[in-house]
Image (cartoon, rainbow, N blue to C red):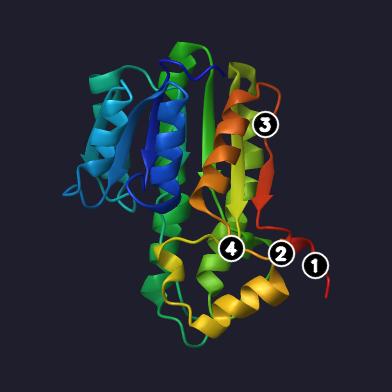
Amino acid sequence: MELTNKVALITGGTQGIGAETALKLARDGAHISLVARNTDDQSLINEIKSLGRNCILLKGDMSKPEDCERVVAETIAALGDIDVLVHSAGGAAPGGLLNGAKDVWYSAFDIHIHAVFHLCMAAVPSMKRKGSGGIILISSAAGLRGVKGALAYAVVKGALPQFTRALAYELSEFDIKVNCVSPGVIRTRFQDFLKPEQVKNNIENRIPLKREGKPEDVADAVAMLLKNDFITGENVVIDGGMSMRIC
């Protein structure tokens, strides 16, 4: 897909991976609709507009189906039919089977899985009108294997690649490509809780490339998948080789 003058809706779009993805797609020519729970900070929208792109910032809680439907409708009203959907909104879901709260389990499914269902249901008719489209879901390397102390998070992130494959097959007849990216240890605000010794262990012992990833690493992969017209149903792992280790 050539991104010039395409319309991209990005949830979780004002921080971390979502923000960097928005900037990358804008630099590649796309007009951007950002969705966030907090819309006080206008710096990103101003930066995107400085690139000569149209940009809107919508307030929405993606754990609520009505907000998913509304932000799609508002994007179409402001910018036109949607070409690209990137679901980057999410959050931590700590706790295991016996020490995790039930509301954490259900909330994790609402923001990571149910949101994707409702966003896609609302956005796909718009893509069909355009004759093609691209959907990118942000999963996690945590979904590739068991993760101690984060049962709900590992389960929902593991479900996203399967959602990707199933939906890619369903939408292939409409030339709508659906792909997933699974970042590993990426330096965002979610890593701020790590102790220095944990950061040191990640770099020295867990990540073969010996560094944390950057949001730009993920944004570049998202753009690559959108631009390639012969990739669909794939999950691209972006973790510096961490998940390939067997010892």
Against 182, residue 104 (above or below) is below
Q: Amino acid at mark 1?
A: Arg
Q: Which label sits in the foreground, 4 or 1?
A: 4
Q: Which mark is residue 212?
A: 4
User: Of marks 2 and 4, which one's residue comes earlier in the chain?
Assistant: 4
Residue to which mark 1 is pinned: 245
Q: CA distance from mark 4 to mark 1?
A: 16 Å
The quarter holding residue 92 reads: bottom left
Q: Amino acid at mark 3?
A: Thr
**Residue found farthest to the right:** 246
Q: Which label sits in the foreground, 1 or 3?
A: 1
User: x%, y% of residue 217?
Assistant: 57, 47
User: Of marks 3 and 4, which one's residue comes earlier in the chain?
Assistant: 4
| Label 3 element class | loop
Q: Residues within 10 Å of mark 4 (few under 14, many from 20)?
A: some
| Label 4 element class | loop
Left or right of 139, for residue 126: left
